Image (cartoon, helix red, strand yellow):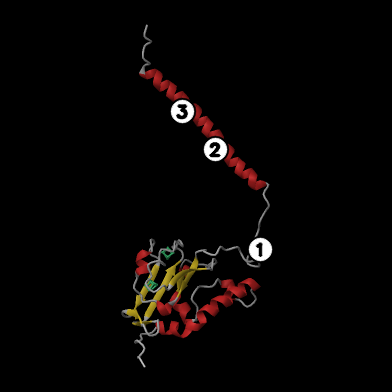
Amino acid sequence: MVAPAPTMYQDDSNGSVRAYFKNIYDTVRTIAIGMGITLKYCFARTITVQYPDVAPPVQPRWRGFHWFEAEKCIACDQCAKACPVDCIYIEKSGPRKIDKETGVAVGGALQRYAIDYSKCMFCALCCDPCPTDCIHMGDNHDLSAYTREDMIVEFTELAKAGKQTPEPFWMQQENIPEWAAQKKARWEERARPVREEMLKALQPSSPAKKE
Ligand code: SF4
Ligand code: SF4
């Protein structure tokens, strides 16, 4: 004798019972995993870095606040177009191009190059399309500010002061930890040779005349 086929009602009933117990199993399992991780950290050694007295560990390819070489920027807007959150602001007084004789940009003045760090997500998408390789992710991880406006870094203003990357407020004081003084010195050392060209980038200029 052939057994009768299960009815629609029986199928639904078996499925919902299975789903009920699966839900209980998933709940217990996920709580156990979460609590396991919590317990692991409860007994792990505490690591507290006494920043800024002690330098925080930063990996070599860390994407920090940008490093900008104003003297090479032709204000082509490629970086701004690539930025997914539109946080790069560029203004120029006329077309700019690289002078092949000197390797620095000439033409109209670079009036503004600014990045709004209240929006920036440090994705580095602005760096790759730059035709003159003048915008890079830097190695500074710290830039606290008191207002949203202060989160906008005016790189052209920094260029006037001979700087290519922003410094945290506390690093601008006299007595800073040794590691920070060394880092600041490295930044200054790197920008010093092009200080004059950085200033020229902010003014209209012509290509160098051939001898
Ligand atoms: S890092 Fe990303 S978000 Fe920040 S300025 Fe560059 S493209 Fe925009
Ligand atoms: S940083 Fe590079 S990509 Fe951006 S405007 Fe200047 S030259 Fe163009």
Label 3 amino acid?
A: Ala
The first of marks 3 and 1 along the sequence is 3
Asked if the residues shown at circle 3 and circle 1 are in contact, with their CB atoms under 8 angstroms apart, the answer is no
Identify the residue shown where x is 60% and y is 76%: 173
Label 2 amino acid?
A: Thr
Q: Secondary structure at mark 2?
A: helix
Mark-to-mark CA distance, 2 and 1: 35 Å
> Among all residues in the image, which is located at the extreme bottom?
211
Identify the residue shown where x is 44% and y is 76%: 69
Asked if the residues shown at circle 2 and circle 1 are in contact, with their CB atoms under 8 angstroms apart, the answer is no
| Tag of residue 19 | 3
**Quarter the N terminus occupies:** top left
Quadrant in which residue 203 is drawn: bottom left
The first of marks 2 and 1 along the sequence is 2
- Name the residue tied to disc 2: 30
The first of marks 2 and 3 along the sequence is 3
Identify the residue shown where x is 56% and y is 76%: 186
Asked if the residues shown at circle 2 and circle 3 are in contact, with their CB atoms under 8 angstroms apart, the answer is no
Q: Is residue 177 visible?
A: no
* Residue 87 in the figure: left or right of residue 23: left
Within 8 Å: ligand 1 and the Cβ of disc 3?
A: no
- Name the residue tied to disc 1: 50
Q: Viewer-proximal residue, 206 or 131? A: 131
Query: Please, is residue 6 above or below residue 94 in the view?
Result: above
Q: Secondary structure at mark 3?
A: helix
Q: Viewer-proximal residue, 170 or 110? A: 110
